[in-house]
Image: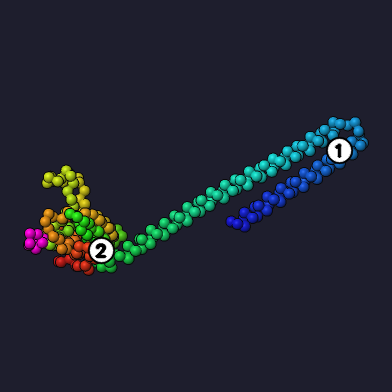
Amino acid sequence: MARDDTHTGGFRRWLVRTLTLALLLALAFLAGAAAMHLGMHAGDQQRIQDLQAQAAARQAELAQAQTDLAAARSRADVQDGTQRVLQEKLADLQQQLGQVRGQLAFYEQLIPPGPAGALTVRAFEIQADADFLRYRVLLTRNAAPNADPFKGRMRFVAQGRLQGKAVKMDLNPPLAPDQAGGADAAPGAVDPLALVFDQFQRSTGVLQIPAGMEIQSVRLEILEGDTIRATQDAALNRAATPAQEPQS
């Protein structure tokens, strides 16, 4: 690109010099011819005026040529600027594509090598926040490229103590304001614990702590219908325990 620009600029400078030299030679020739004509025909003023008009016309043509050349240079500069903007945008898109490919490769590595359809809880964290629990879940599934997506649901089971007794209780997201009185979910309402995914799924959300319950740990169960496909336990404010295989 730099060699093309240098070659183009050199050609333009050569063209201007050539046109200027040609005009000077033409003017010298016309001036000499006028002097000779004036000497030979001292009274032929009309011929001198014609030659002067021709010289003025040639000078005007040269000025126009210089104007056109300057405009061409300006357009070339604009084109160069546009090309630089496009090149920068292309480089940015290539960088973004590289980042997306890197993320895709990372998640592909997480997919377990087990039998087709095998589902694994890769990460499960849960943290107390006042009267609520905040959870983060990462699931992976070894699915064939054209396999149907996995459809199921998460179930959270808390283990702890309530009124001095060891208990287990299901945890659910907080009720919406219109359900606080115990009304059933509205028709068509989205289940926040539902799962639909192909190869991996990241989920975050909030669970309500039952009144008066002191929670020690929470078990995450991945259900497909009534079948438990995978489980994992997590203690509050601590890293998740190793994944457990679902019981048959």
Mark 1 sits on what residue? 34
For marks 1 and 2, give the one nearer the viewer. Answer: 2
Coloring scheme of the render? rainbow
Mark 1: secondary structure: helix
| Number of residues whose C-alpha sits closer than 10 Å to that of mark 2, classed few (under 14), some (14–19) or many (20 or more) | some
Residue appearing at x 77%, y 44% in the figure? 23
Residue type at numbered disc 2: Ala
Mark 1 vs 2, N-terminal side: 1
Would you say residue 214 is visible in this rendering?
yes
Q: Is residue 37 left or right of residue 176?
A: right
Q: Which disc is residue 141 wearing? A: none
| Front position in the image: 197 or 27 | 27
- The picture places residue 32, in percent across and down from the top left corner, at 86, 41
Which residue occupies 69% across, 40% down? 64
Distance between the alpha carbons at the discs numbered 1 and 2? 98 Å
Q: Residue 240: which quarter of the image? A: bottom left
Specify whether residue 147 is in view.
Answer: no
Q: Main secondary structure of the magenta part?
A: strand
Whether residues under marks 1 and 2 lie with C-beta atoms below 8 angstroms apart, the answer is: no
What range of the chain is rendered magenta? 161-168
Q: Residues within 10 Å of mark 1 (few under 14, many from 20)?
A: many
Q: Secondary structure at mark 2?
A: strand
Q: Which residue is nearer to you in this view: 28 or 175?
A: 175
The kind of residue tagged 1 is Ala
Q: Verify whether residue 25 appears in magenta.
A: no
Residue 91 point in image, percent of width and height: 47, 56
Residue carrying label 2: 123
**Where residue 179 appears, x then y in whole percent?**
15, 45
Which quadrant is home to the C terminus?
A: bottom left
Report x, y in % for residue 7. Answer: 65, 55
164 drawn magenta = yes
